[in-house]
Image: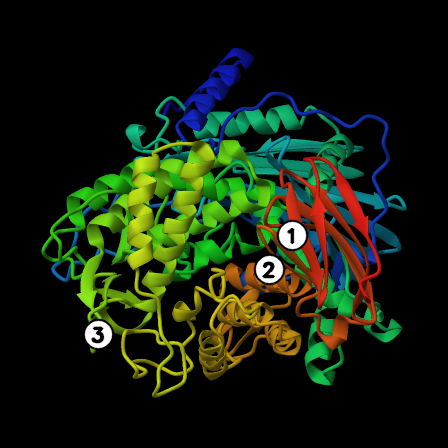
């Protein structure tokens, strides 16, 4: 890297934006590119905060427990955990494209893809920012309080020292593509201290205010910081920025990589200098007041956050008086419902989605937040539940725009996934290779990285599950442009299964059916069973979705007929006469752990929709699914509890669904799963070490919405699994419904009193509560309000 780079000109910035546009056309969005000047709100005061959207704590985070105590901010690709310590603010900064590893296009002797930090790679930190204020040590201050305003995307810290009230605000602006720290005071106080920006991979700081380096995989990265204040001085001193006697201080930081979502370019933009661009971004942002940057950020954030509002009832005055962590502990200790806390937990999930899934990569196992460079499972994208569960909430909870990151990722990776499938899936070392000897289309491994690479075992049905998730987004939005984009993914997955399915005769009959070749029911039981329920259900749904896409787009009708014929012959799971459960394998015996964390055989209940307790599915199958779900239990990882809750919601059992929500809201303790002080879903491995699994947060939020509204194209059910704790009164506005609708719902004493149905592309649906049904026909953009559901 040039040791004395010049700042990029405006022409250069626009040129980089053009390169980013080319990458977008190839199927993804750029991760770190210059943008046009953001639209600034003019003259509008910042809206007042609401106690229902504000979380608060009475102590800062411990630097050694940031994943459980640090407060998250993010702008969709650039994120940070903040400690909020009065004397030493620490930010652990991430970029969604900050990944080691590479294409990982080899198999080991066992037929697995290598799965380590040196080959597959890992999500990793971009940098550390510290703001030291030595005379503001925690022991020297009083009245400490820190808050996370979910509605404004704003972390605030306040405290009193020597009679002066000090305040700081931290936010991650998407319009300006920077993280901002703004320090103020009232009462004549001053700030004196230093600022340091450091890399976390042994980088050499060539400048005080920025750094740049590259990984062995060729990914270049960089970050930069700038600071300005009033009433004092801000100077560069050696490796630090010093400030002295400032009445207020603003710190601006940005950074990123030269990642490009383009397989043909090996996922790199060689023309992009990340350090240079970071310096330009902080310089541009520092040309505006902190108040201007804040207003611009809040306007952008609220535009998404306010798409859904929620009330599950009113908490007691005693509950409201507690800080957030005390409320979590009291909820677990006393067993009393705290409806405002529970609603805030759902909104916290929405906050994380807005902060972590816009204009870059989808959320991985860690979301956008790290406390070190060694996240468990490399912070990857698990295709056997994690990446799908992360997006179950988006459309349901009024955040359809945030789903695009998943679509963009799949399209950008498709060329690599296809090439690896064609080259390696039928390798004789792969235990899951096609017995037919044929190969077509694409699939993935259990783990994927952003460089087109696979890790761990091949996951044949992973393609179907990804495609079904992408299709469901179409069902919510009715976006034809989205359908056009995902069509190649759907067709390629069908081609893969056309070459993979085997014909077998069911024992004791002459009936021939199609079954999946050898596979592993994630992550459970025999490694090489044929016809596993998990694959049969996912492929059945894939075929149905492809046929619908073909008809809608009027494409490939002949091939759609071929897929229809295959779907008709697919074996569908039976209920075991031995256990009474829906079979997980083509065997009456349970071949695994009764309480296993995965619900692989229940994908047809949720997220699929083939198994329904409405008379359209044989009652014996519903009973078998219910028996299996009961056997799995209610004590597991957060994501597994969330999946269980969603299944109980589909079975219309609100109390069981609610109990699993409550289980996830318990404080995490040694050896168990639960909620951390900062509301991250944490599995405590041992004392002092917790593993963050963000799908637990998102899955739990999705379950809460599913309890309030069930939908499929042609049908919307109001309050299908409403628990007693939320029944007295409540409301939710902005809930997505499959079929192309948005629903606003108010209820009292467990009964809807008003439901407004608005079309976002849908035409006709039936709205139901209990035995009461109403048929609704609307044009896109129209709405209707329904009342009186007591008949």
Q: In what quadrant of the picture does the N terminus appear?
A: top left
- Eyeballing the image, is 514 above or below 784? below
Residue holding disc 2:
702
Corner quadrant of residue 628 = bottom left
Between label 1 and label 3, give the one nearer the viewer: 3
Q: Between residues 725 and 607, which one lies in front from this camera angle?
A: 607
Residue holding disc 1:
397
Label annotation for residue 509: 3
Q: Between residues 558 and 352, which one lies in front from this camera angle?
A: 558
Spot the residue most to the bottom. Answer: 578
Corner quadrant of residue 532 = bottom left
Q: Position of residue 745 (x, y in %)?
A: 77, 56
**Distance of label 1 from label 3 (alpha carbons):** 47 Å
**Distance of label 1 from label 2 (alpha carbons):** 7 Å
Between label 3 and label 2, give the one nearer the viewer: 3
- At horizontal 28% and vertical 54% (from top left) the residue drawn is 455
Q: Position of residue 485 (x, y in %)?
A: 44, 33
Q: Is residue 134 left or right of residue 531?
A: right
- Which secondary structure, mark 2? helix
């Amino acid at each position: 890297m040039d040791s004395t780079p010049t700042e990029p000109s405006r022409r250069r910035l626009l040129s980089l934006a053009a390169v980013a546009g080319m990458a977008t056309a190839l199927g993804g969005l750029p991760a770190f590119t210059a943008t046009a000047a953001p639209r600034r709100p003019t003259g509008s005061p910042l809206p007042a905060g609401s106690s229902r959207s504000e979380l608060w704590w009475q102590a800062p985070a411990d630097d050694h427990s940031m994943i459980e105590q640090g407060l998250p901010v993010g702008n969709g690709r650039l994120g940070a955990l903040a400690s909020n310590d009065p004397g030493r603010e620490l930010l652990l900064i991430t970029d969604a494209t900050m990944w080691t590893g590479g294409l990982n296009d080899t198999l080991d002797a066992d037929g697995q893809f290598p799965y380590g930090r040196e080959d597959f790679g890992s999500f990793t930190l971009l940098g550390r920012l510290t703001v030291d204020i030595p005379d503001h040590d925690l022991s020297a201050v009083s009245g400490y309080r820190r808050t996370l305003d979910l509605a404004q995307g704003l972390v605030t810290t306040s405290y009193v020292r020597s009679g002066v009230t000090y305040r700081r605000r931290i936010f991650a602006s998407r319009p300006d593509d920077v993280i901002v720290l703004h320090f103020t005071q009232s009462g004549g106080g001053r700030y004196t201290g230093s600022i340091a920006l450091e890399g976390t991979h042994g980088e050499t700081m060539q400048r005080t205010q920025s750094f740049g380096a590259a990984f062995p995989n060729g990914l270049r990265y960089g970050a930069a910081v700038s600071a300005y204040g009033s009433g004092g001085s801000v100077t560069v001193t050696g490796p630090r920025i010093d400030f002295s006697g400032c009445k207020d201080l603003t710190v601006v930081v940005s950074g990123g990589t030269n990642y490009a979502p383009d397989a043909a370019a090996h996922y790199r933009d060689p023309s992009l200098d990340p350090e240079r661009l970071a310096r330009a971004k902080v310089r541009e942002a520092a040309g505006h007041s902190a108040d201007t940057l804040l207003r611009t950020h809040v306007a952008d954030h609220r535009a998404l956050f306010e798409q859904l509002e929620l009330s599950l009832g009113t908490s007691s005055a005693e509950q409201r008086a507690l800080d957030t962590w005390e409320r979590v502990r009291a909820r677990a200790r006393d067993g009393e419902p705290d409806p405002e806390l529970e609603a805030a937990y759902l909104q916290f999930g929405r906050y994380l989605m807005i902060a972590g899934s816009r204009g870059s990569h989808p959320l991985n196992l860690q979301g956008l937040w790290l406390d070190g460079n060694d996240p468990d499972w490399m912070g990857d994208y698990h295709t056997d539940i994690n990446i799908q569960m992360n997006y179950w909430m988006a459309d349901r909870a009024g955040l359809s725009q945030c789903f695009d990151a998943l679509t963009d990722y799949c399209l950008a990776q498709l060329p690599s996934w296809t090439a690896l499938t064609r080259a390696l899936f039928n390798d004789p070392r792969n235990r899951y290779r096609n017995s037919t000897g044929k190969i077509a289309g694409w699939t993935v491994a259990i783990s994927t990285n952003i460089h087109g690479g696979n890790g761990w075992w091949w996951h044949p049905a992973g393609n179907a599950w990804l495609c079904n998730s992408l299709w469901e987004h179409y069902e919510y939005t009715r976006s034809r442009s989205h359908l056009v984009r995902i069509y190649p993914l759907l067709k390629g997955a069908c081609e893969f299964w056309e070459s993979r399915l085997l014909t077998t005769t069911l024992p004791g009959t002459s009936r021939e059916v199609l079954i999946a070749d050898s596979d592993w029911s994630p992550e459970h039981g025999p490694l090489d069973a044929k016809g596993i329920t998990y694959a049969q259900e996912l492929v059945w749904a894939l075929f149905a979705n492809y046929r619908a896409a073909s008809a809608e787009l009027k494409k490939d009708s002949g091939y759609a007929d071929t897929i229809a014929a295959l779907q008709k012959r697919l074996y569908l799971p039976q209920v075991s006469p031995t256990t009474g459960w829906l079979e997980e394998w083509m065997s009456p015996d349970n071949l695994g752990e009764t309480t296993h964390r995965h619900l692989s055989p229940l994908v047809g209940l949720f997220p699929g929709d083939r198994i329904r307790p409405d008379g359209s599915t044989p009652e014996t199958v519903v009973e078998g699914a219910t028996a299996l779900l009961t056997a799995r239990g209610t004590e597991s990882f957060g994501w597994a509890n969330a999946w269980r809750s969603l299944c109980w919601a589909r079975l219309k059992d609100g109390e069981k669904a609610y109990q699993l929500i409550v289980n996830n809201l318990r404080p995490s303790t040694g050896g168990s799963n639960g909620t951390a002080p900062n509301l991250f879903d944490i599995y405590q491995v041992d004392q002092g070490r917790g593993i963050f699994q963000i799908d637990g947060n998102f899955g739990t939020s999705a379950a809460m919405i599913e309890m309030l509204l069930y939908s499929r194209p042609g049908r919307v059910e109001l309050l299908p699994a409403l628990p007693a704790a939320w029944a007295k009164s409540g409301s939710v506005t902005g809930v997505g419904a499959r079929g192309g609708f948005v629903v606003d719902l108010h209820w009292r004493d467990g009964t809807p009193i008003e439901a407004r149905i608005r079309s976002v592309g849908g035409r006709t649906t039936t709205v139901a509560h209990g035995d009461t049904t109403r048929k609704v026909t609307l044009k896109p953009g129209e709405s209707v309000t329904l009342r009186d559901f007591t008949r």
